[in-house]
Image (tube, helix red, strand yellow):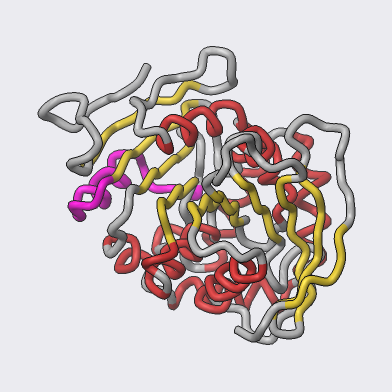
Amino acid sequence: MGQLRFRSVARERSSRPGALAERWTTVDGVKVLYRESAEPPSEPEPRVMMHLHGFGLSGRYLLPTAERLSSEFHTIVPDLPGFGRSGRARGLDVSDLARSAASLLDDRGIPSATLVGNSMGCPVICEFAHLYPERLERAVLVAPAGGLHNQPLTRAVGQLARDGVREPARLISVAVPDYLRFGVPSTVRMFRALTRYPSLERLLALRIPTLVVIGSLDPLMPTPARVGEVARQTDNHVVLVVIHGAAHAINFSHPGELANVIRRFMADEPILDDPESDGEARAYEIHRSPRVPAKGPDAGPAGA
């Protein structure tokens, strides 16, 4: 990607706790909107966390979770090129989006970060890890999509339709404008790119602490048993968490529980359910790295 230049700073929801400021920059001639921690966390050198959105959407629906973590992490939530309010992009594939994420970190002078993705954002994270392994500290894959379970396009559309009735009604006002702005031609091109992307190969190649979070009501995901079966094909440090009562857009529908799970994962703490938040989190530790104490000799439930 080309050199980035910072263009302007705007303000958004500055009165809300954890609110992120809207900012603009340019990635290879494309104007890109992103949201960033308005107030830096209290730590001298806070860890950086970038949240990456799903297919056809913008970063807006990720804000409920991102804002809950912004006091502990230097938080960035972009509309990737071609999505949301960012400008149209020439190329629209997974590699392009991963490079754009890296270029945005370059613009902010950030050498490495933890990436939190939802749906399509998860393949983007896997490609980021492939292209820039030294720049990815941890991966948080929330409802990863884009594999064989979501093909062909007609099947994916049907899954999205079933998911729509399981999500909070207030998501409509966020998602519909994003989908309309993204458009049918971009939808076809991006879906085609996702079907060609080696998602499973890249996922199994991850060599960093990885958290996989899925919802028990998500029609776009295989069963938790199948997800666990895939996770066991790698010796990477993987924690699988099922949030019962959640569907696909967990970052929007269950932000308190998801933020709690991410917070504990980042601190290498056992994943325990947050009784004050919607949903019930249950963790299954597939593999643990040597520096992270295991719960016991077998991979099993690690939380309530």
Residue 198 image-quadrant placement: bottom left
Residue at 38% over, 66% down: 134
The percent position of residue 111, horizontal first and vertical second, equals 51, 64
Residue at 59% over, 21% down: 278
Relative to residue 155, is residue 137 drawn left or right?
left
Q: Which residues are magenta?
A: 220-237
Task: Give the quarter of the figure containing the N terminus.
Answer: bottom right
Q: Can residue 192 be seen?
A: no
Q: Nearer the viewer, residue 85 or 34?
A: 34
Relative to residue 84, is residue 223 drawn left or right?
left
Relative to residue 261, is residue 74 drawn left or right?
right
The percent position of residue 105, horizontal first and vertical second, equals 60, 65
Residue at 77% over, 45% down: 38
| For residue 53, above or below residue 6 | above
Relative to residue 52, is residue 218 drawn left or right?
left
The percent position of residue 292, horizontal first and vertical second, equals 25, 36
The percent position of residue 141, horizontal first and vertical second, equals 45, 49
Q: Can residue 86 be seen?
A: yes
Please check the rendered image and state whether residue 157 is part of the magenta-colored stretch, yes or no. Answer: no
Task: Give the quarter of the figure containing the C terminus.
Answer: top left
| For residue 116, above or below residue 218 | below
Q: Nearer the viewer, residue 226 or 78?
A: 78
